[in-house]
Amino acid sequence: QVQLVESGGGSVQDGGSLRLSCVLSGKTFTDYCLAWFRRAPGKEREGVAAQSPDRRTTNYQEFAAGRFTISRDNILRTVYLEMNSLKTEDTAMYYCAARKLSPGGSCFFGLTYSDWGEGTLVTVSS
């Protein structure tokens, strides 16, 4: 059983920065793709960014490119989402998720991720 625990959410002003963290336990960290998703009030959940176990492949949703950075520390078993130049429309619950990578498979966040954290709330005010 994979367990994911997020932290780092909070309230910031427009233009501010936050770094989210997510620790994975229970399984071999380097077997898993890791991704961040978010769900804004009244909206569908959407992918933000995803990264392969070897960190060679990273995908970003268009709104995240250039402002957000996903990274992972395979020793600390942690995935991060560095968010800069935050906007009010970035207000959402942010979730990390894990997907076991099969040989020849992909970590793209449009694919099904099987394991989820409970989320951490990010609020951006003007």
Image (cartoon, rainbow, N blue to C red):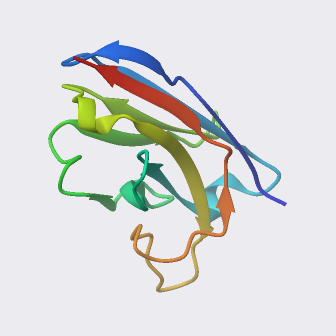
Q: Is residue 64 above or below residue 85?
A: below
Q: Position of residue 61 (x, y in %)?
A: 26, 58
Q: Quadrant of residue 47?
A: bottom left
The image shows residue 101 at horizontal and vertical percentages of 57, 73
User: As displayed, is residue 121 above or below residue 41?
Assistant: above
Point 19% across, 49% down: residue: 63
Q: Quadrant of residue 85?
A: top left
Q: Which residue lies at the image location 53% right of the left edge and 23% below the top edge?
A: 8
Name the residue furthest front.
Answer: 42
Q: Position of residue 16 (x, y in %)?
A: 25, 16
Q: Quadrant of the C terminus?
A: top left
- In the picture, measured across the screen, residue 116 lies left or right of residue 16, that is right
86 shown above or below 71? above
Q: Residue at x 60, y 60 (%)?
A: 98
Residue ranking furthest to the bottom? 104
Q: Residue at x 34, y 59 (%)?
A: 56
